[in-house]
Amino acid sequence: MSFSVVVLAAGEGSRMKSSTPKVLHQISGKPMIWHILKEALKVSDDVTVVLYHQAERILEFLKSEFENLNFIFQDHQNYPGTGGAVRDIAPKYEKVLILNGDMPLVRAEELKKFNEIEADIVLAVIEIDDPNGYGRVILKEGEVERIVEEKDASAEELKVKLVNGGVYLFKKEVLEKFVPLLSNQNAQKEYYLTDIIALAKQEGLTIKPLLVKEEDFKGVNSKSDLAKAEEIMQTRIKERWMKEGVIMRLPSTIYIDIQTQFFGECEIESGCVFKGKNRITSSLIRSQSVIEESEIQNSSIGPLAHIRPNSKIFNSHIGNFVEVKKSSLRGVKAGHLSYLGDSEIDEGTNIGAGTITCNYDGKRKYKTIIGKDVFIGSDTKLVAPVKIEDEVIIGAGSVVNKDVPKGSLAISRPVLKTISNFYYKFFGKE
């Protein structure tokens, strides 16, 4: 690894209009900066994050996710701006790649390309059809001549479709020489990293462009940008898993967290949502089902099922409008309209429609344990803590608040009472 990486994450991100720091806004289940650092650590063992706005909050997250990062706190009061952000960096290598913390779509293979170009400075350049609102990058004989702001561009320069991608590879000595020379004599009274380009050009240094795709270096500055970046990330995630053999029905309607994994030949129908660290093996997930932080093997789920966190479902069928939470099910059938929370249910058991594990008394959660080959009738309430042993039948409509021994029938119903001719009396009919 022959270059250092610096990620600028000090900005306030006011255009996001949020109390959450911009770099902590999530894309496909993880904050933007997580995606950037994951890729940066693939290409360098010397990665530094520059912080300022809500620094402690960002730092707490990053330390919980990564072990091998360096951190710098920008002296924003005295040296605001991107130029001020890099004043105190101490790179390990002779080349330094500088990224923005709001580029969640960047990929390691694209970052490596900067190091393949020999120059004092390598500048990411994006060609876009409509460059309105962007500064233009002016090239001459294959090198960057200058970056001109749109308001200062001539009519000819305005025709240029090359814009600054906001990513730079500097030789360490270039930064050491020019960062102290930056001035804040501008409208914003900030120190700009881009000013190094003009200073370096005056010294005759080589500044070469690297043409990159807008998709890979797209910045996220608003909720609209966030949504567009999410769409791109989701497309990448789903294309990856389809290449691995996952069947997807109308993939554009499916949401898959970047932490979710699939094994074997899985099938996902339209409208499904996978949140968090799921592990799905050789299973069918029917339309409009939601899976959260769970493991599913050799099972069919849904349609319209909700598998909540910490569930393990093996060799089972979970039907429509069934909710499972923090439960372990092995070889179970729960066809429809049930809630199974904080439970352990063994193979061969059938859960009738409307069955509920009553696991919460207002203060604490309790477990329901159900053995093998149990048949539970419809509309049954299992009041935890309760244990139903093997080969038990529970009559429909029962409320079970005591353990049931093996081989038993448990039934709890009020006596049916009928009143003759009540209908006619009630409605005043003869």
Image: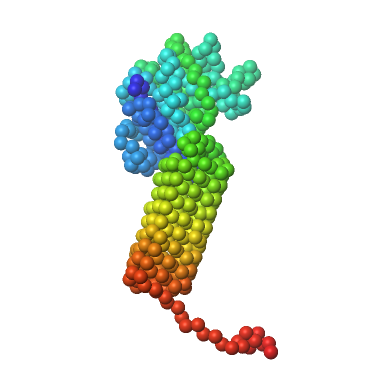
As drawn, which residue projects farthest toward the right?
Answer: 430
At horizontal 35% and vertical 34% (from top left) the residue drawn is: 73
How far across and how far down the image is residue 221, in percent? 51, 36
Colouring style:
rainbow
Residue 102 drawn above or below residue 355: above
At horizontal 52% and vertical 50% (from top left) the residue drawn is: 286
At horizontal 53% and vertical 54% (from top left) the residue drawn is: 303
In the rendered image, is residue 368 in sight?
no
Residue 258 drawn above or below residue 180: below
Residue 424 drawn above or below residue 86: below
In the rendered image, is residue 239 in sight?
yes
Give the image quarter of residue 21.
top left
Quarter of the image with the N terminus in it: top left
Give the image quarter of residue 83.
top left
How far across and how far down the image is residue 222, in percent? 53, 39
Residue 284 drawn above or below residue 12: below
Who is closer to the viewer here, 399 or 426?
399
How far across and how far down the image is residue 389, in percent? 34, 67
How far across and how far down the image is residue 130, in percent? 62, 27
At horizontal 50% and vertical 13% (from top left) the residue drawn is: 143
Quarter of the image with the C terminus in it: bottom right
Q: Number of numbered discs present?
A: 0
